[in-house]
Image (cartoon, helix red, strand yellow):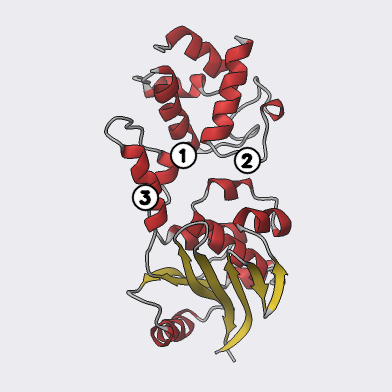
Amino acid sequence: MKTLSTLTITPAGATLNGTLLAEAGITGLYRRFVGDYPKFFKMDHLCKLGLLGAELLLKDFTPEEKERGAVVIFNRSGSLDADRHYQSTLAADNYFPSPALFVYTLANIVTGEIAIRHKIYGETSFYIMDARDDTAMQCILDSTLLTSDPSFILTGWIEYAGEDDYIADMKIMIQE
Amino acid sequence: MEELIEQLKAQIIEVLNLEDMTPADIDANAPLFGEGLGLDSIDVLELIVMLEKEYGIRLSNPAEGKAIFASVATIADYVSKNRKK
């Protein structure tokens, strides 16, 4: 398996294959590189990061190649940021649970959002780990390649802990 | 009624995170679902919560929903007749 391209998104901006694309926040990157997917604004931060990463990494893939792709994402805190946001709508003195926030209180929604946007019909999975473990992550990716023979794997580590503390460290992997 | 319609447009933009839209972009008589704003089933749940939170309206009959949420104008008509606050 080899790495085709890499992307990192942090509060400092987005870097694609080692080249700084833009120094911008999440919404700034959306407006500059996507701009045509209003559903983006309804998403939680985890999904926004995943969607931005997919958008930048998959721009040269054909629809046929995307159909057979796989999406495998990892992180440590699951959907904790969305969980907290939803919890804030459950206050005893102001109890108006938000359905739109509730739908993002599940970490693997990010893989579904990416698959919907890009019409990816291969495996989608999300793994939560105590800490980033690149060896274990590679074992899972090897297994994905063996069991489903995707045209590529869009994978990475995505964490959101606040507007000054987030990372999407993503890459495209293909079979050698 | 015009004031209520404009207020509802602003509230819909806010609760549904329609960040690239302004009240002027929303036709009060255009369908909210399918064509028009293209809202989905989660959005309608969010609008139901908004009606309760902002106007004290609890929708007791789900069958009424389709007619109430047809457009901003139909929501405004329903709110004007049923609001508790």
Q: Which mark is residue B42?
A: 1
Q: Earlier in the sequence, mark 2 or mark 1?
A: 2
Tell me the kind of residue under disc 2: Glu
Quadrant holding the C terminus of chain A = bottom right
Q: Quadrant of residue B31?
A: top right
The residue that mark 2 highlights is B19
Q: Chain of mark 1?
A: B
Instruction: Tell if the residue under mark 1 belongs to the same chain as the one under mark 3.
Output: no
Q: CA distance from mark 2 to mark 1?
A: 17 Å
| Residue A97 placement (x, y as % from top left) | 35, 37
Q: Quadrant of residue A48?
A: bottom right
Report the front residue among A54 and A46. Answer: A46
- Residue depicted at 34% across the width and 45% down the height: A87
Q: Is residue A56 above or below residue A46?
A: below
- Dot 3 alpha-carbon crowd within 10 angstroms: few under 14, some 14 to 19, many 20 or more: few
Tell me the kind of residue under disc 1: Ile
Element assignment for label 3: helix
Q: Are marks 3 and 2 in contact (CB under 8 Å)?
A: no
Element assignment for label 2: loop
Element assignment for label 1: helix
